[in-house]
Amino acid sequence: MRKILISITGASGSVYAAGLMHKLAAIPEQWNEVSVVMSANAREVWKTELGDESYRDFPFRYFESMDFNAPFASGSGRYDTMIVIPCSMGTLGRIAGGISNDLVTRAADVVLKERRKLICVVRETPYNLIHIRNMETVTLAGGIICPATPSFYSKPATIEEVAATVVDRVLDLAGFDISTYRWGK
């Protein structure tokens, strides 16, 4: 079974994190532990964008952003996948620079050093050269950059359906077996 870490930063895009949490909660047979770490800014952005505090309602383990006693702060915790969703450019820059100043960046450092899966769902537009170079650095270190760029092949009709095109791609990248729109079917 799998141990998954969801890190939610203060970038706009709480709808992506909410969609991921809903979909993971719907497939509990595919994981044995999901942990969540959210920045204070992420909680504020969630309330602004989604109008609630529903991030508290999922059957996951929650950790404060400075709790370095969290199991995923060490490679011995054996978390196999970390998803940073949405991933702010500040967080991406600290990950790329190896700066472990909070639990999110420490966990990313651990996942990379242990050669496990790190997926950063970056949420910014346009990108400047620093962003692009940080994405390159994380990619070269073994991370996956998955921009929060939706697709429209499935003809999504709501904001949640548009966001689900990104969330489903993230779940595919993480290796989950999900039912979703597939090109050519």
Image: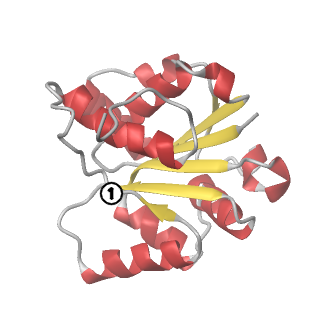
Q: Position of residue 158 (x, y in %)?
A: 16, 25
Can residue 45 be seen?
no
Residue placed most toward the observer, 31 or 16:
31
Residue placed most toward the observer, 122 or 56:
122
Q: Would residue 78 appear left or right of 110 to someone viewing this image? A: right
Q: Position of residue 42 (x, y in %)?
A: 40, 42
Q: In the rendered image, which residue does mark 1 sit on? A: 147
Q: Position of residue 178 (x, y in %)?
A: 49, 29
Counting labels gives: 1
Residue under the image location 21 percent in, 33 percent down: 154
Check disc 1: other Cα within 10 Å, few if <14, some if 14-19, many if 20+.
some
Q: In the rendered view of the protein, which quadrant contains the N terminus? A: top right
Residue under the image location 73 percent in, 47 percent down: 79
Q: In the rendered view of the protein, which quadrant contains the C terminus? A: top left
48 in relation to 54, above or below: below
Residue under the image location 22 percent in, 44 percent down: 151
